[in-house]
Amino acid sequence: KRHLISAADLSRDDALLILDTADELAKISERSIKKLPTLRGRTVVNLFFEDSTRTRISFEAAAKRLSADVINFSAKGSSVSKGESLKDTALTLEAMGADAVVIRHGASGAPHRLATWVRGSVVNAGDGTHEHPTQALLDAFTMRRRLGSLDGRKITIVGDVLHSRVARSNVLLLSTLGAEVTLVAPPTLFPVSVDSWPCQISYDLDAVLPKSDVVMMLRVQRERMNAAFFPTEREYSRRYGLDRDRVARMPDEAIVMHPGPMNRGMEIAAEVADSPRSTIVEQVANGVTTRMAVLYLLLGGADLGGEIQ
Ligand code: CP
C-alpha cells in the first residue's frame, strides 16, 4: 500500500503486519539500538495545520530513528496565513522531494485530497472529526502488549464520540482485529452515522464497565462544540467520568487508556490517569514505535538485518 488514510483501508493481515513490525522495532530499541539506517536519503514532511503534541513529536522521532531527513511544517508562521491553498502548499512540498507527507488538518478528507496531488506516501495524522489511523494502531499495539491477542476482547470507548476521529479509527481497526467494541456516550455525543459502525452502543457506563477488558476514555472536545448542546462539566463527569469508584467496577486485569490530551477531572480523574492501570504514558512511547513501523512499511525501507521476517 502507498498511503495510510483510513483504518478501513487495512485488512487484518495489513494491520497484523504493522503491529508485528512494531514489535520487532520495539525489540531492537530495547537492545539500546536507538537509530537504524533503513530510511537514509528519504525525506518525511510533517505537515500540521492543527495543533499537536504527541503525534507530531512521535512522527518526527520515528522518522529520525529510521535515519530519514525530516521537514516540519506548521501552518502557523507559513504562507497559509497569506491564503495559500492546501494544493499549492502540497505542490511546494512535492518540489522539495518529499517521499512521505504526514498531514494533520482540520478538514475531514484533506489527506485523501492531498494523495491525489503528491507522488509520495500520505499518512493521515488526524483529519477533522474523521480519522486518526496511527492513533488506532498505537492503541491496538498497546492493548496487544498488555493483553495478548485482541480476538474476542471487549473494548469500551467512552465519551465525545461525535467529534472523535480516534473513536472512528479505533472502531474500524479493532473490529478488523476481532475485538468487540462498545461505544458509550450521552445521546447528544453520538454521530448520526454510528448505527452503521461495526460496534455496539450504550448510554450506561456503569453497566458496561464490569464486562470490559479495556476502557478507553475520549477527550471532551469543547472547542468543536456548541455550548448549548453540552451538559455541565459536573454533570458530564458524574455520568461519564472515570473515577476511582468506576475503576473498581472493572475486572482486575482491565486497563485504562486515553489518547491525550486529557481534561483531568472531567472525563478522567487525575488519580486514575496516573494509576498503574493506566497505559497513557505507554501509549505515547508506543506511538513512536508504531509510526516507525508505518513509515518503514510505506517507504519500503532497507532490510533491518534479518530482524523483520
Ligand atoms: N493523541 C493525539 O493525537 O494527541 P496530539 O493531538 O497531541 O497529537
Image (cartoon, rainbow, N blue to C red):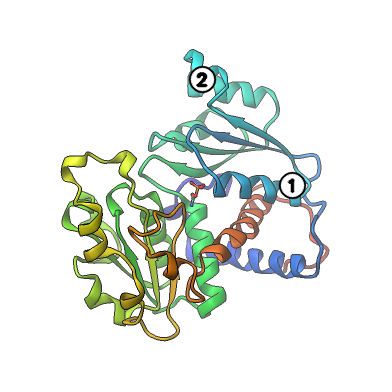
- Taking the image as shown, residue 238 lies to the left or right of residue 50, namely left
Q: Secondary structure at mark 1?
A: helix
Residue 208 image point, x, y percent: 26, 76
- Inspect the image, locate mark 2, and give the three-letter code of the amino acid beneath it: Val
Residue 282 image point, x, y percent: 57, 66
- Taking the image as shown, residue 149 lies to the left or right of residue 223, namely right
Q: Which residue is mark 1?
A: 64
Residue 12 image point, x, y percent: 48, 66
Q: Which residue is mark 2?
A: 80
Q: Which mark is residue 14?
A: none
- Taking the image as shown, residue 255 lies to the left or right of residue 21, namely left
Farthest residue to the bottom: give it: 252
**Residue shown at the point (52%, 35%) measured from the top left:** 115
180 lies above or below 108: below
Quarter of the view holding residue 245: bottom left
Q: Is residue 84 visible?
A: no
**Residue shown at the point (20%, 70%) measured from the top left:** 204
